[in-house]
Amino acid sequence: MSTINIHEDKFVSMQFITELTGLSDKWFYKLVHEGKFPKPVKFGRSSRWIESEVKEWIEERIKLSRSGSIVIFNEENK
């Protein structure tokens, strides 16, 4: 992952991530547990993700998908 600049980045919620991708929160938490999605930053009981890390992850999935390496958005992944 790239260097984080907190002055130019922001924290986003799981709701933001699920609305952005159309995928379920359960699927993302599974990926976090498997080390395949950025870990959240904890603020007490709340979890937030760094927006640039989430977008970088999505961009990488798009590149891999278009190269034929993986399938990312199907009903089994939700």
Image: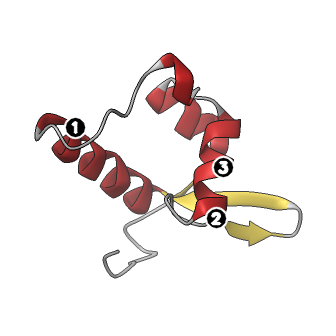
**Residue under the image location 46 percent in, 31 percent down:** 20
List the residue tagged with mark 2.
40
Residue type at mark 2 is Pro
Q: Secondary structure at mark 1?
A: helix
Provide residue 12's location: percent of width, then percent of height.
57, 51
Q: Earlier in the sequence, mark 2 or mark 1?
A: 2
Q: Earlier in the sequence, mark 3 or mark 1?
A: 3
Provide residue 18's location: percent of width, then percent of height.
57, 32
Q: Quadrant of the C terminus?
A: top right
Q: Secondary structure at mark 3?
A: helix
Q: Earlier in the sequence, mark 2 or mark 3?
A: 3
Residue type at mark 1 is Ser
Residue type at mark 3 is Lys
Label 2 Cα crowd, 10 Å radius (few <14 / some 14-19 / many 20+): some
List the residue tagged with mark 1.
65
Q: As drawn, which residue projects farthest toward the bottom? A: 3
Label 1 Cα crowd, 10 Å radius (few <14 / some 14-19 / many 20+): some
What separation in Å lies between label 2 and label 3 (alpha carbons)?
13 Å
What separation in Å lies between label 3 and label 1 (alpha carbons)?
20 Å
The disc label shown at residue 32, or none = none
**Residue under the image location 42 percent in, 74 percent down:** 7
Label 3 Cα crowd, 10 Å radius (few <14 / some 14-19 / many 20+): few
Q: Are marks 2 and 1 in contact (CB under 8 Å)?
A: no
Residue 27 located left or right of residue 42: left
Q: Nearer the viewer, residue 5 or 61?
A: 61
